Image (spheres, coloured by chain):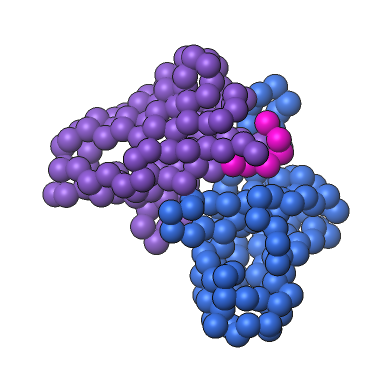
Chain colours: A purple, B blue
Amino acid sequence: GQQVMQIPQYQHVQEGEDFTTYCNSSTTLSNIQWYKQRPGGHPVFLIQLVKSGEVKKQKRLTFQFGEAKKNSSLHITATQTTDVGTYFCADGKTSYDKVIFGPGTSLSVIP
Amino acid sequence: EAQVTQNPRYLITVTGKKLTVTCSQNMNHEYMSWYRQDPGLGLRQIYYSMNVEVTDKGDVPEGYKVSRKEKRNFPLILESPSPNQTSLYFCASSLLHSGKGVDYEQYFGPGTRLTVT
């Protein structure tokens, strides 16, 4: 069946350093969604990418959707302690009505 | 306030004792879903529902049941819980997709931490 993979699984950065997480799907995606889960919290929607090659920015966060719509990335510039959490990508339910999440990348920021 | 509520938030139970985790949303969403979250495995979909009386299996449905008798409620039932169902459970809801490749964000409940001994 379809798989969504993410790397790295864990990332520890010094505050102020940049961070990138990568998401890869075994099949072509209709769209990709990104969620953030703070420690002890629940996942919260960040953004959706739909078009091939799409790039969207939210302040220090930059999201990209690959040209082949099989991969995506989230880049955080100059991390802050508020960025701590786990970042998930997900293949939305337009593909199969199911939702497939990647395993997530856990980000720690050292002050 | 738009929200998804789950109850209970924490539950410790014993093997074989039937339990129900309730989920309710006040956003009139058609789509509701249950996930379990385990370390290193991310969020795995258990069951989902696209509308009242319409439910379907996700990736890990074994040992679980659901029902959707009302649009706002989507309870998760464990008829005979086992220790391998110890996990963090999330309910989520959203509008259905637009049919044009565009999906809608899911709103998650606060989670239910279940321990089965």
Residue shown at 60%/28% (left/top)?
Answer: A27
B83 is within the stretch colored magenta: no
Image coordinates of residue A13 in percent, x first then y, are 20, 43
Q: How many marks?
A: 0
Q: Position of residue B19 (x, y in %)?
A: 68, 77
Residue B82, by quadrant, is bottom right
Q: Which residues are magenta?
A: A95-100
Seen in the picture, residue A70 relative to B77 is either above or below; the reply is: above
In the image: residue B13, left or right of residue B41? right
Where is residue A96 shown, x and y percent of the image?
A: 71, 35
Q: Is residue B104 visible?
A: no
B21 horizontally vs A103: left or right:
right
B85 w.r.t. A5: above or below: below
- In the image, residue A5 sits, relative to residue B112, either above or below, namely above
The secondary structure that dominates the magenta segment is: loop
Q: Quadrant of residue B26?
A: bottom right
Q: Nearer the viewer, residue A89 or B74?
A: A89
Q: Nearer the viewer, residue A111 or A103?
A: A103
Q: Position of residue B61 (x, y in %)?
A: 70, 58
Residue A100, can we see it? yes
Residue at 31% of width from left, 47% of height from top?
A10
Identify the residue shown where x is 70% and y is 67%: B63
Direction from residue B53 to residue A19 in the image, left or right: left
Question: Which residue is rendered at x = 85% and y = 53% of the image?
Answer: B53
Q: Nearer the viewer, residue A41 or A99?
A: A99
Quarter of the figure with the N terminus of chain A: top right
